[in-house]
Amino acid sequence: MIESLGHFVTGLGVALEPTNLLFCLIGVLCGTLIGVLPGIGPVATIAMLLPITFYLTPVAALIMLAGIYYGSQYGGSTTSILMRVPGESASVVTCLDGYEMARKGRAGAALAIAALGSFFAGILGTFLNVLFGPEFAQIALSFGSAEYFGLMVLGLSVSIVMSHGSMLGAVGMVLLGVVLGSIGRDINTGFPRLTFDNPVLSDGIGFVPLAVGLFGIAEVMRNLEGGSGAAGSILKVGTLWPSREEARRATPAVLRGSLLGTILGVLPGGGSILASFTAYGLEKRLSRRPEEFGQGAVEGLAAPESANNAAAQASFIPLLTLGIPPNAVLALLVGGMMIHGIAPGPTVMTEQPALFWGLIASMLIGNILLVIINLPLVGIWVQFLKIPYRFMFPAIFLFCCIGVYGVNSSSFEVLLAVGFGLLGYAMSKLGLEAAPLVLGFVLGPLIEEHLRRALTLSDGDLTVFVTRPLAATLLALAMLAPCLVLLPQFGKRRKEIFQEEE
């Protein structure tokens, strides 16, 4: 551990070199911008900038690309809180309570909590990378497809139990999400599924039109329902800093979200989206005020924002120590390393110590730059709330359409987003939550992939899910969670907690 700290200090010297510091600043600025703009995302941005890195040093190139990735987690909360439009995929959960805080006149406080929570999570994630990176990577290696299957099923099970309203409605939303996620070509056979012979659907439904439609466009429809939309708009900005009570409630949520995000960020296929949903569910389960979740709970904002940023930092651990990219963004970073003739894996730490520790140290500097950049911007962002809603809603709708179209230059996806907006509006009228649907959409393909892979490796033997202790434990917990609702005490309390207010 002491040796690792010594290497980290050496890495700080590399990261603080003027050229590397400049590209760290460029990376986090680009990340913040693409986080604010819905639909672009770090994958598309890094893919476009990858050829440019050929003209940079390997350290500067990777520092910039990494800054874009974790910087996007900061910026994604801005439009989620102010307009209920998720700027980045991991910010979907932020819409649930962050936007409600803004509607209650706490927009400035919500933005500050998101920025400070992300900052703490980033710092904690960086130091955990330094101290326990190889150990975390070894734990991740112990997860096989059977364990991943159990983890994903547990995530869906908990989302059903902790959702508002009836469990039957939540189950329906999860199943609908799984069905929507399965549209497209089969990953093994290439056979089209649920495409209705429409070639546009052969690649499946994108996450961006689904999220922007269910949250952004549906919110515009709800706000316009009464006429001008003034009843649903944010009429009061409030102070730009959280109150003492809000800070007291946010602190433990930030800590739990950071630790949970660090753990889940190491696992391939988990990443920021799973971390934010899981952190939200955990806080709702532990809270003494679960009825406030979805109504502007501070914990419901602080925990997911911390979790998604910690997961972004932790996802570098398997890449740098094992050469295994846990998500699509870091797979592109592997491409950036290969452009410079660097083979990702354990040899990077020994053969390229300046690159390895310089990149780790740059995360600390990048998070400091991000909080310096984002906190002053809070006052600028909240000024948009003073614009009358009759002028705002066309801009929000146009913003959503441009973001969706910009991903694949597809007008069909814009129509899909509008269709999902209508679905989200109808769901709100029926008292159904969008979060279980989104989680089912994200985890459904992963559940199918790991189920089929586990059965392939075991020659079709279903006992693989019970003979592996960790997989059996996760599946047992997944089955136990819904059974708790059948207990009279828990079921009655849940009904009282999640009863919708008129």
Image (spheres, helix red, strand yellow):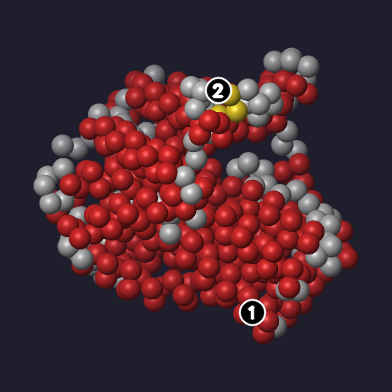
For residue 464, side relative to residue 343 (left or right) = left
Mark 2, Cα crowd under 10 Å, few <14 / some 14-19 / many 20+, is some
Residue 428, located in which quarter of the rendered image?
A: top left
Residue at numbered disc 1: 21
| Horizontal side of residue 143 vs 284, given as left or right | right
Identify the image quadrant of the C terminus: top left
Q: Residue furthest left?
A: 227
Q: Give the spatial CA distance, label 2 vs label 1.
A: 48 Å
Q: Nearer the viewer, residue 218 or 73?
A: 218
Residue 373 in picture, x, y percent from top left: 46, 75
Q: Residues within 10 Å of mark 1 (few under 14, many from 20)?
A: many
Dividing the picture into quadrants, the one containing residue 337 is bottom right
Apparent side of residue 14 relative to residue 480 in the rendered image (left or right): right
Q: Nearer the viewer, mark 2 or mark 1?
A: 2
Identify the residue at horizontal 20%, vertical 60% (top origin).
Answer: 391
Residue under pointer 2: 193
- At 68% from the left edge and 81% from the top edge, which residue is drawn? 19
Say what amino acid the circle numbered 1 marks: Leu
Rendered location of residue 477, percent (x, y): 55, 27
Residue 13 visible to an observer of this rendering: yes
Residue 67, x across and y down, in percent:
60, 66
Specify whether 52 is left or right of 478: right
Disc 2 is placed on an element classified as strand
Vertical order, 233 against 138 (above or below): below
Q: Position of residue 241 (x, y in %)?
A: 33, 70
Regarding residue 499, the answer to whether it shows in the image is no
Q: Kindly identify the amino acid type of the residue bearing the numbered disc 2.
A: Arg
**Residue 446 or 200: which is nearer the viewer?**
200
Query: What element does badge 1 sit on?
Result: helix
